[in-house]
Image (spheres, rainbow, N blue to C red):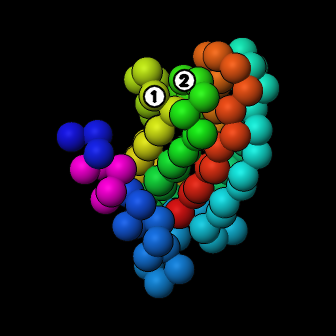
């Protein structure tokens, strides 16, 4: 089921330039390294009424977890399984800014994070 979801999200992200993007600035991608047992934090504004999709694909070196919080600090979406492949999708009611946290549960991990 998780593989199917990843495939669907990958397709959505690939089609993002021709579809309505959820991220206010348009689709985004970042490739970086999160140090062992640490957290990377992103601030992303998503458009209200449009699907917001975030994916994280790591180098398989450690478990990565993905958490999304709204402006009030409430958890909106998460993927905290035991892999370094994460996918979350939600539809914000209004245009607002979210904190996206990529949490590394082990050794340093090179990953790619994408938003639609």
Closer-to-camera residue (74/34): 34
Query: Compared to 10, does 18 lie above or below?
Result: below
- Badge 1: few (under 14), some or many (20 or more) residues near its Cα, within 10 Å? some
Q: Quadrant of residue 62?
A: top right
Report x, y in % for residue 59.
60, 39
Report x, y in % for residue 18.
47, 84
Query: Compared to 114, does 85 lie above or below?
Result: above
- Badge 2: few (under 14), some or many (20 or more) residues near its Cα, within 10 Å? many
**14 lies left or right of 70:** left
* Numbered marks: total: 2
Specify start and end residues of the magenta stretch as a single range: 4-8
Whether residue 78 is visible, yes or no, is: no
Report x, y in % for residue 88.
43, 42
Residue 46: say if magenta. no
Residue located at (57% from left, 57% from top): 115
Q: Name the residue under label 1.
A: 83
Residue located at (33% from left, 57% from top): 7
The answer for how far apart the CA atoms under marks 1 and 2 are is 5 Å
Mark carried by residue 51 = none
Residue located at (54% from left, 23% from top): 63
Whether residue 37 is visible, yes or no, is: yes
Query: Compared to 112, does 15 lie above or below?
Result: below
Residue located at (21% from left, 40% from top): 1
Secondary structure of the residue carrying numbered label 1: loop
The mark that comes first in sequence, 1 or 2, is 2
Mark carried by residue 63 = 2
Q: Are marks 1 and 2 in contact (CB under 8 Å)?
A: yes
Give the main secondary structure, helix, strand or loop, of the magenta stretch: helix
Report x, y in % for residue 11.
37, 67
Closer-to-camera residue (63/79): 63
Query: Compared to 115, does 89 lie above or below?
Result: above
Secondary structure of the residue carrying numbered label 2: loop
């Amino acid at each position: 089921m998780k593989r199917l979801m990843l495939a669907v999200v990958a397709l959505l992200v690939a089609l993002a330039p021709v579809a309505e993007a959820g991220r206010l600035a348009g689709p985004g991608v970042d490739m970086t390294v999160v140090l062992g047992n640490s957290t990377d934090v992103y601030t992303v504004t998503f458009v209200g009424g449009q699907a917001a999709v975030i994916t994280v694909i790591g180098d398989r070196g450690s478990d990565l977890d993905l958490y999304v919080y709204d402006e009030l600090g409430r958890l909106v979406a998460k993927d905290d399984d035991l892999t370094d492949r994460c996918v979350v999708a939600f539809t914000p009611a209004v245009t607002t800014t979210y904190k996206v946290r990529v949490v590394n549960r082990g050794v340093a991990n090179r990953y790619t994070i994408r938003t639609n």
